[in-house]
Image (spheres, rainbow, N blue to C red):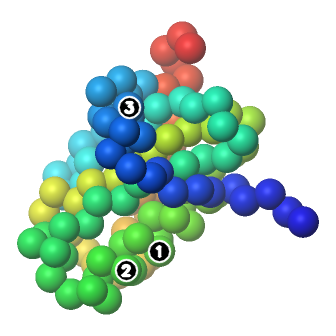
Amino acid sequence: MSQRRLAPLCGNSQFEQVFSSADSKQHAGDLFLLLKRNNESTHRIGLITPKRQLKRAVDRNRFRRVARACVAKLPTDQHYDIVALVKRMPSDLHSTDISRRLDTLLSRLVKKANRTPA
């Protein structure tokens, strides 16, 4: 049986740990990402997609699906807790555009987190 590469962040306490002591943060207009190294055996992701910002459930689900796929592509030599927050309606809601933006933001986050000592 294969091991999961991605798990959800569950509960306020896990989200608070990432928000209070993030190793790196990246803000790109309508998206805000936080990253914290973890000692788990997998990446963990928390997605915050408010109805006020993404009105249609289709858009919220698309963002979540694409974000999970982008985080699953991260290398597994180091594991991270990642929180992705949608601050306002993204200008480009196509899956390829969101994926491209998230990939660049995540690569910046990982570089920045690996520069700081553990």
Gap between marks 3 and 2, in whole Å? 25 Å
> Disc 1 designates what residue?
65
For badge 1, the amino acid type reads Arg
Q: Residue at x 36, y 24 (%)?
A: 21
Please, which residue is most extreme toward the left here?
52
Above or below, 8 relative to 19: below
The answer to whether marks 1 and 2 mark residues whose Cβ atoms lie closer than 8 Å is yes
The local secondary structure at tag 2 comes to: helix
Q: Earlier in the sequence, mark 1 or mark 3?
A: 3
Q: Provide the residue designation for mark 3.
A: 17
Splitting the image into 4 quarters, where does residue 12 fall? top left
Residue 61 is marked as: 2
Mark with earlier residue (3, 2): 3
* Quarter that holds the C terminus: top right
Q: Judging from the image, what secondary structure is the residue with disc 3 in? A: helix
Question: How far across and how far down the image is residue 78, in percent?
Answer: 67, 34
